[in-house]
Image: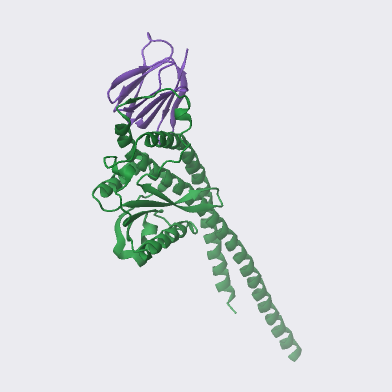
């Protein structure tokens, strides 16, 4: 059995760990609120843009001359997986879940004879995927604190991806991120970003509902060509916003669990400590009494 | 006699208010939007949006926008800008 001193040190160390996890939980809770607000503030833009792109895309017939971002390259051979995770760990299964989904897709695509290229945003996803797909990694970005990313950053990443698309590096790009449903559930999600997924009929709704002829300045195709890169950027931005909220939610849950586990551990160790102390006292008493009797 | 005007960036909803007139820097030239404007979609170049709150005679409030898109429909004017300040 461990000595009294060792137990006491152990209890002390678990207690200080508990303090840290508790603090991290509270920090995550505060950041979560901000990340959630940010995710909500970005929604009107994304919705408007989506409906505009959908209504424009339904008016333009896809042909050879259409923007490649809309029509695709006509092939389905090279897939780019854009894996958005975070740079920091200690967030439960947040990064693991995204990486697992991406890995599954990569394996399926490889099995189907496709070429897979991986583009990571976030150090953690890169670390996990590097083990199996080292040869497929084409680029990695380390975005730092997800909560501090602004649209200009997303735009820069999107421009890089679009430039690679236009250089013919890939045919289809899929984005992996974690969709924030609630504090307790974050769902790893795969979403096709290039070429733009065909708009769902009826999603255009309000724009055309007036029935009035809409004037376009310049013409529809030019507007569309202008908006499509923005659309990629906004999807990326939204994904990162969702990721930021998910990361904090996941971290909060993980740290809450850790705090509780530390509490349980402290209770167990305290009981053990008291028993050991009691045993030592009993032994001492027995020694004194038997010594006295011997006299 | 009011035009509903919304200015939205990816980060937040910057403005949502009823105004008299807004002048938007369209990519093919500036255009002013009053209430009852015909439906229009236009890309926006980098420049200043001018907001006339109550009448034409007052000096307008200007907001700088970069890159984006303006849409006029029966509900008013919506400007989607990548940056606004």
The total of numbered circles placed on residues is 0
* Quadrant hosting residue B85: top left
Residue A60 vs A114, above or below: the answer is above
The image quarter in which residue A259 lies: bottom right
On the question of residue A190 being in view, the answer is yes
Kindly indicate which chain is depicted in green in the rendered structure: A
Give the image location of residue A223, x and y in percent: 32, 32
Q: Is residue A18 above or below residue B61?
A: below
Q: Nearer the viewer, residue B38 or B27?
A: B38
Q: Is residue A119 visible?
A: no
Q: Position of residue A110 (x, y in %)?
A: 36, 64
Residue that lies at the very extreme toward the top in this rendered image: B57
Give the camera-side residue of A103 and A13: A103
Residue A266 percent across, percent down from the top left: 60, 65
Residue at 49% over, 41% down: A34
Q: Give the residue drawn at x 48%, y 27%.
A: A209
Q: Nearer the viewer, residue A286 or A169?
A: A169
Could you say which quadrant of the image residue A227 lies in? Answer: top left
Chain ID for purple: B
Q: Position of residue A232 (x, y in %)?
A: 36, 43
The residue lying at 47 percent from left, 41 percent from top is A39
Q: How is the image coloured?
A: by chain
């Amino acid at each position: 059995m461990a000595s009294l001193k060792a137990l006491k040190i152990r209890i002390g160390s678990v207690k200080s760990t508990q303090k840290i996890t508790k603090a991290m939980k509270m920090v995550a809770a505060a950041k979560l609120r901000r990340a959630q607000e940010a995710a909500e503030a970005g929604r009107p833009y994304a919705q408007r843009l989506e409906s505009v792109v959908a209504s424009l895309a339904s008016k333009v017939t896809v042909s050879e001359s259409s923007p490649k971002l809309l029509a695709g390259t006509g092939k389905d051979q090279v897939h780019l997986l854009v894996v958005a995770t975070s740079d920091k760990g200690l967030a439960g299964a947040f990064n693991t879940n995204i990486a697992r989904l991406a890995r599954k897709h990569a394996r399926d695509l490889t099995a189907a004879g496709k070429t897979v290229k991986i583009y990571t945003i976030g150090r953690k996803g890169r670390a996990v995927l590097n083990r199996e797909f080292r040869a497929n990694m084409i680029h990695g970005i380390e975005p730092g604190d997800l909560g501090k990313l602004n649209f200009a950053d997303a735009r820069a990443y999107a421009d890089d991806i679009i430039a690679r698309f236009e250089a013919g590096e890939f045919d289809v790009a899929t984005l992996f991120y974690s969709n924030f449903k609630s504090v307790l559930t974050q769902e790893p999600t795969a979403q096709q970003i290039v070429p733009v997924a065909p708009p769902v009929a009826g999603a255009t709704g309000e724009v055309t509902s007036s029935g009035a002829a809409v004037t376009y300045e310049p013409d529809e195709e030019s507007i569309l060509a202008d908006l499509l890169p923005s659309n990629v950027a906004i999807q990326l931005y939204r994904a990162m916003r969702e990721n930021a909220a998910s990361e904090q939610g996941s971290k909060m849950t993980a740290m809450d669990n850790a705090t509780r586990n530390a509490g349980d551990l402290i209770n167990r160790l305290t009981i053990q400590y008291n028993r050991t102390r009691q045993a030592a006292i009993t032994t001492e008493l027995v020694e004194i009494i038997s010594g006295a009797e011997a006299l | 006699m009011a035009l509903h005007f919304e200015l939205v960036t990816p980060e937040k909803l910057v403005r949502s208010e009823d105004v008299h007139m807004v002048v938007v820097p369209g990519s093919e030239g500036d255009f002013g939007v009053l209430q009852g404007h015909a439906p229009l979609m236009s890309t926006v170049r980098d420049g200043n949006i001018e907001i006339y709150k109550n009448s034409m005679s007052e000096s307008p409030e200007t907001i700088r926008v970069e890159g984006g898109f303006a849409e006029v429909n029966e509900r008013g004017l919506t400007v989607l800008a990548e940056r606004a300040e």
